[in-house]
Image (cartoon, rainbow, N blue to C red):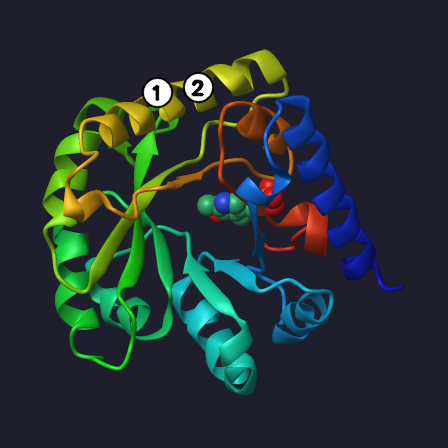
Amino acid sequence: MNSIVVNLIQVRNRIELAALASKREPEGIELLAVSKTFPASAVEEAMHAGQSAFGENYVQEGVDKIVQLEKLRPWLVWHFIGPLQSNKTREVAQHFDWVHSVDRLKIAERLSTQRGEFPHLAELQVCVQVNVSEEDSKSGVALTEAEALCDAISKLPNIALRGLMAIPAPNPDPKIQREAFSAVRDCFQRIQSSHLVDPGYQFFDTLSMGMSDDLEAAIAEGSTMVRIGTAIFGKRDKITK
Ligand SMILES: *Cc1c(COP(=O)(O)O)cnc(C)c1O
């Protein structure tokens, strides 16, 4: 078996063990394979091992891969997870199924309008990125501002508000990892519980958190989607965030 297939099996095992350790159903945690910097052939290999959801960080690289793999499109779900500038929103609205990294209303408004230009596409699935590690605050809205941004996004057409995404600063200590994830989970549950009958929140079910080095802590704190790159595809050559 090639290494991507073996790695996928190992990652799925880690997810299952982490779920069982916190008495959760493993099926409640989706695996997003982060294929940034890896070629379309790596995505194809993972797909043949049963993986369908893929995450990309860079607009051009992601769109190139999506176009290259056009014939497999019906089996793939593409998630944009990287920083998003306004001049790149149209390409994302045209090609991706999900965006995890919305942290400003202006970006969401552009995605909403531009998604509407492709009426054959389903609503764009959107998570709001929150910032839990202030010292490294390049992206993400503050936890205290997440609900207001969600409210505004929940009213936009052509977009389904799905939940929150977070990338805490890397830390080797599982206790510190869990503290950050727990703060995001609290915020998520607070927002969810104050909109139980709000139609703009009917699909608000996603807590996108956990990467190769902290997926266990994220699952212990309620993650419903882990975004895994290195543990599936190997180390990346390019310097990435
Ligand atoms: C690169 C990246 C990942 C995957 O990180 P690994 O440590 O390689 O698993 C997850 N989420 C985001 C937003 C990323 O940029």
The image shows residue 66 at horizontal and vertical percentages of 48, 76
Q: Residue placed at 23% from the left, 29% from the top?
A: 191
Q: Amino acid at mark 1?
A: Asp
Tell me where residue 104 sits by quadrant: top left
- Left/right of residue 41 with respect to residue 208 in the rendered view: right
Q: Secondary structure at mark 1?
A: helix
> Which residue is the extreme one toward the right?
1
Query: Is disc 1's CB within 8 Å of ligand 1?
Result: no
| Residue 241 visible here | no
Q: Secondary structure at mark 2?
A: helix
Label 1 sits on residue: 186
Q: Quadrant of ligand 1?
A: top right
Q: Is residue 65 above or below residue 204?
A: below
- The dot on residue 142 is none
Picture quarter with the N terminus = bottom right
Label 2 sits on residue: 182
Q: Is residue 121 above or below residue 179?
A: below
Q: Residue placed at 21% from the left, 70% from the top?
A: 115
Query: Is disc 2's CB within 8 Å of ligand 1?
Result: no
> Which residue is the extreme one toward the top?
175
- Left/right of residue 142 with respect to residue 57 in the rendered view: left
Task: Give whichever of 86, 68 is nearer the camera.
Answer: 68
| Residue 149 visible here | yes
Q: Is residue 170 above or below residue 122?
A: above
Q: Residue placed at 41% from the left, 70% from the top?
A: 60
The image shows residue 188 at horizontal and vertical percentages of 32, 29
Q: Amino acid at mark 2?
A: Ser
The image shows residue 160 at horizontal and vertical percentages of 25, 55
Say few, some or many: other residues with alpha carbon within 10 Å of mark 2 (under 14 / 14 to 19 / 20 or more): some
Task: Give whichever of 101, 200 is nearer the camera.
Answer: 200
- The answer to whether mark 2 and mark 1 are in CB contact below 8 A is yes
